[in-house]
Image (tube, rainbow, N blue to C red):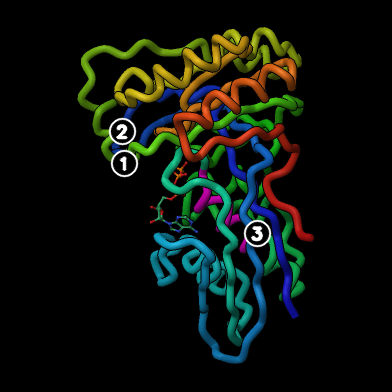
Amino acid sequence: MKVTAKAYAKINLMLDILSTLPNGYHDLFMIMQSVGIYDRVTVSKTDSEDIEITCNKEGVPTDESNIVHKVATKFFADTGVKNTGISVHIEKNIPQAAGLAGGSADGAATLVALNELFGTRLSLKEMAQTGGKIGADIPFCIMGGTMAAQYTGTVLSFLPDLEAENIVIVKPKQDVSTGEAYAAFDKAERVRHLDTRGMLIAAATRDKKGIFDRVDNVFEQFIDVPDRVVIKSIMRKHGCECCCMSGSGPSVFGIFEKREDAEKCLAELKKSFDEVYLCSSVDKGCETE
Ligand code: ATP
């Protein structure tokens, strides 16, 4: 018996850090959007009483450090279901360490698949609560679509789906450590905060122009990704409605009204970058096949 779930990547239409909390975590305001780049996570029952992980891509850990392992362990602990043995295969398509929540999406898909495989009938909210104990982006990756995510990212509010058909995403080669990105925020003397209230109202009232005018990421003020300047100028040249870095980077996305413009932009970016994608928004975080 096996269940396969698609695990969709996310972009941040807005990411602001409101403050550093006494426990060292950060109080965030984010508008999250699921997009149509996805991993496929297949969970099968075995009789090993273990959690085995395989992945088609090198560089993804397959031991206890994989988010999938941590989520599965938490699923068995929270539900009281005995782990008679599972194997999880990750077909990786989401670029790694990219600011696109690839690991969190796999964790979310694992929960959804386990819920079906073991017939536990957990609600989305219950799965989000279990996932949130492992990673702050996992609850969003379970719910998906367009949402506001606050506090560490685990406090979610539903928003109308954005419905953007032409999203170009580029993952430059540069590595960005999320820990270092937050440390750079903590050290910064001045922060230009974003129009979070205006963004929330624009998103809640389906004001697409209002959303695109406010798309921004506070990390762009602290994290230097030289390719970002080049990517954004190419996206603007092709008439994007907005462009911005996602998460703590380094990926940059641009949203286009016309498919034709997005395709031209994609073709030009492919001359300089290996990891370039054209996708649409999706209204869910995971789905079983
Ligand atoms: P976020 O946007 O949530 O910060 P990210 O897209 O920047 O995430 P991920 O692709 O989720 O980054 O991976 C970050 C690190 O987590 C990787 O370098 C890898 O070592 C580790 N990792 C653990 N589990 C996974 C997984 N299932 N897929 C990818 N990376 C994983």
Q: What is the three-letter code of the residue carrying label 2?
A: Ala
State the residue at coordinates (41%, 18%).
Answer: 230
Q: Is residue 25 above or below residue 166?
A: below
In this view of the protein, which residue sits in the foreground, 189 or 9? Answer: 9
Per the image, the residue denoted by label 1 is 177
Secondary-structure class at tag 1: loop
Number of other residues with Cα within 10 Å of mark 1, as a class: few under 14, some 14 to 19, many 20 or more: some
Region rendered in magenta: 101-111
Distance between the Cα atoms at labels 3 and 2?
Answer: 29 Å
Which residue was labeled with disc 3? 40
Residue 9 percent across, percent down from the top left: 59, 43
Few, some or many residues within 10 Å of mark 3 (<14, 14–19, 20+): many
> Residue 242: percent from the left, percent from the top?
58, 14
Q: Are marks 1 and 3 in contact (CB under 8 Å)?
A: no
Q: Is residue 168 above or below residue 85?
A: above
Q: Is residue 14 visible?
A: yes
- Mark 3 vs mark 2, foreground winner is 3
Instruction: Indicate which disc residue 78 carries.
Output: none
Q: Position of residue 41 (x, y in %)?
A: 63, 63
Residue with the most extreme bottom position: 47
Q: Which amino acid, mark 1?
A: Ser
| Tag 3–tag 2 contact (CB < 8 Å) | no
Q: Does residue 203 show up magenta in the picture?
A: no
Give the position of the N terminus as an image quadrant.
bottom right
Disc with the residue nearer the chain's start (1 vs 3): 3
- Magenta-colored stretch includes residue 105: yes
The residue beneath circle 2 is 181
Q: Amino acid at mark 3?
A: Arg
Q: Secondary structure at mark 3?
A: strand
Label 2 with label 1: CB-CB less than 8 Å: yes
Q: Nearer the viewer, mark 1 or mark 3?
A: 3
In the picture, the quarter occupied by the C terminus is bottom right
